[in-house]
Image: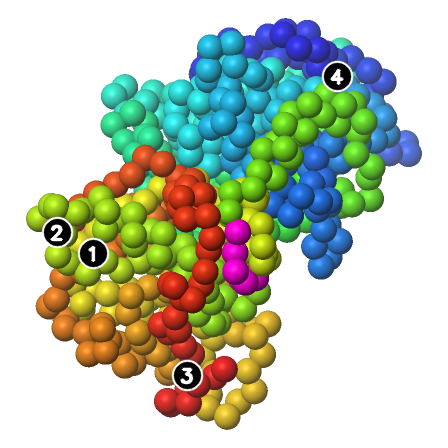
Amino acid sequence: MPLNRRTFLGTSAAAGAGVAIAGSATAPAEAHSPGNSRKRYSFTVMGTTDLHGNVFNWDYFTDREFDDKAHNDVGLAKISTLVEQIRAEKGRGNTLLIDAGDTIQGTQLSYYYAKVDPITAEQGPVHPMAQAMNAIGYDAAALGNHEFNYGIPLLRKFEEQCDFPLLGANALDARTLKPAFRPYVFRKLRTPYGRDVRVAILGLTNPGIAIWDKANVQGRMTFPGLEEQAAKWVPKLRSMGADVVIVSAHSGSSGTSSYGDQLPYVENAAGLVAEQVPGIDAILVGHAHSEIPEYFVTNKETGKQVVLSEPLKWGQRLTLFDFDLVWSAGRWTVEKVGAKVVNSNAADEDPEITKLLADEHAKVVEYVNQVIGASTVAMSTAEAPWKDEPIIDLISVVQAETVKAALAGGAYAALPVLSQASCFSRTARIPAGQITLKDAAGLYPFENTLEARLLTGAQLKDYLEYSAKYYVRTAPGAPVDTANLTNADNTPDYNYDAVYGLTYDIDIAQPVGSRIVNLAFEGRPIDPAAQFVLAVNNYRASGGGNFPHVPRAQQLWSDSDEIRNTIINWVKARGTVDPAQFASVGWRLTREGTPVF
């Protein structure tokens, strides 16, 4: 087993066995009130979430150091420096480090070791995220939904390579309904009083996995709600002697869901867990890609305040939960707990981590800089959220042509093929001249695959009406500020779809549900009863975003390869990308018939 910076006095047993792993003994953090002889002890739990394959402060899609408008930095190398600073300040034995999931998907670094040089190969490499997290010394990590993107065998191999447990109390074996992963782990922190603090860490993941990665998990695993499973496990942990219970939850805090009534569970349930399940002291929140330094929720049963914190994604922030405990009635009791986040842009990259993974980084940089073709003009997604841009049409034409070829000669070959596409990143671009693999990968950063579904004209109108809720209602004549025009009702860019092959206007002066006008196919109003084939990604087809009709529509064909690879191969086959051959203005924003742009 690779060496960790953190030394444990014991080892964990199999899933659910509850064998404690003891923390290292170092100088403890103490807090004595003047004139108060009661035993007190303080410790800190550090937390990350949604690392998404980021080790270096590097953007593989632009092939340069990561930067954004807020000058955030990313990556475990910077987190490592912060972690060591906190350990030095608090005492190594008085800290724990946990993560709330979505670890092995998101960058070309993580993709490379899943698909190009996979860790599952015989004598395959150790995943860079496992190497980095092992070296930093994580105590536990919850499973995120994106852990399942590459299939269960790769996830199991990653689990095997980690020196810390992957936790998922609500990831159950579909046959036995027993935990498929460890539900929890215990850590012991030594105090100067001969009375260890027993910290239980419960991991919860997202029920949406059953929808989003249906192809990988159906019939193999099931994912009940977080509140239900927390209510089952937290009392057990307390009965097993837990002085402190921390939940690491790959679930946002808002109580909302993107999958509507497709599941009886809430997607973003961390706040509900705090409110409904007594016995929890703190929750590390993930999944929502939000920054929540400190948020208190009152438990309905006990009236106790539970602290929640969500550090910003990709290693941009590190959460610190600071616990103050007092010895009372023969046990340690949490007297106070607070939370804050630390910005990683204030830290240098840890040279130990960058050196450890320098070879892997170099391989991936070489890989993404392969030239795959050329473009006659430059294309960008900068205005794609509110204009029909050629770069999004590129996604759609590749999907439509792929589906047409797949259906050729079959029963549905004569039906028109339409295609949905979203703007996944507002910074994606295809340059004029040479196109590299990173250009195409930046256009489609997710590992989605392609399907063909059968829809009617009426269903397509419903689909577009639902998509159009993305826009803020704006009265005729009112000023239009593109910075505030989109993402209405917290709809992310990836949940706004344009449909290629139709023409239509979106009247943003109208209420949601009444915005699609002049909907036509080949110049004529669409026939509500006519049948169409929709080329659609598997996330949307399986219910992601809660779009109507598609999840229950007949599947005519599906592909196992990523859409990103399909785009790359399409560009390679043609050599030159010329938007004049495929791009058109199929949709536009209007107000009472007047174009917005």
Residue 569 seen in render: yes
Which numbered disc flags the more N-terminal residue, 2 or 3? 2
Q: Earlier in the sequence, mark 3 or mark 4?
A: 4
Report the side of 239 relative to 520 (left or right).
Answer: right
Identify residue for label 2: 412
Give the Cα separation between the discs numbered 4 and 1: 55 Å
| Amino acid type indicated by mark 1 | Val
Q: Which mark is residue 590?
A: 3
Gap between marks 3 and 4 measured at Cα: 59 Å
Identify the magenta region.
374-381
Reading the chain from its start, which is encountered first: label 4 or label 1?
A: 4
Q: Amino acid at mark 4?
A: Arg
- Residue identifier under label 4: 5
Q: Position of residue 30 (x, y in %)?
A: 84, 26
Residue pictured at 10% horizontal, 68% vertical: 529
Q: CA distance from mark 2 to mark 3?
A: 35 Å
Mark 1 sits on what residue?
Answer: 533
Marks 1 and 2 close (CB-CB < 8 Å): yes
Which residue sits at x=27%, y=19%?
A: 176
The secondary element bearing badge 2 is classed as loop
Mark sitting earlier along the chain (3/1): 1
Percent coordinates x, y for residue 503 in the rendering? 30, 74
Visible residue check, residue 267: no
Above or below, 351 against 50 in this view is: above
